[in-house]
Image: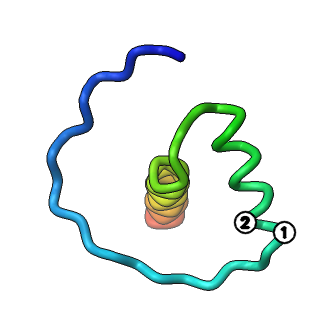
């Protein structure tokens, strides 16, 4: 287990979502393998998706 720096203190809000059971099982497997929480996984995934959307939007504006 690697030493992670303490998480930054940020204001958080609860987000309840429904996902297919198979997707939840896959997320749990990845989180177990990578020794991370589901919250960390989902936060990273949302950040990556938002960055991708922003990059795609910038490409379209240049055309």
Report the disc number at residue 22: 1
For this orientation, the residue located farthest to the right is 22
Up/down of 19 relative to 23, above or below: below
Residue in view at x 16 percent, y 62 percent: 11
Do residues under tags 2 and 1 come within 8 Å of each other at their CB atoms? yes
Up/down of 46 relative to 48, above or below: below
Q: How is the image coloured?
A: rainbow
Residue 4: image location, x then y, percent? 37, 22
Residue 18: image location, x then y, percent? 62, 84
Residue 27: image location, x then y, percent? 70, 55
Residue in view at x 54 percent, y 82 percent: 17
Does dot 1 land on a helix, a strand or a loop? Answer: helix
For this orientation, the residue located farthest to the top is 2
Residue 43: image location, x then y, percent? 44, 55
Q: Residues within 10 Å of mark 2 (few under 14, many from 20)?
A: few
Residue in view at x 54 percent, y 39 percent: 36
Report the disc number at residue 9: none
Mark 2, residue position: 24
């Amino acid at each position: 287990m690697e030493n992670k720096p303490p998480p930054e203190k940020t204001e958080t809000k609860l987000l309840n979502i429904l996902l297919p059971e198979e997707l939840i099982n896959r997320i749990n497997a990845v989180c177990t393998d990578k020794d991370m929480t589901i919250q960390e996984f989902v936060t990273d995934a949302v950040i990556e998706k938002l960055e991708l959307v922003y990059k795609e939007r910038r490409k379209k504006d240049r055309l």
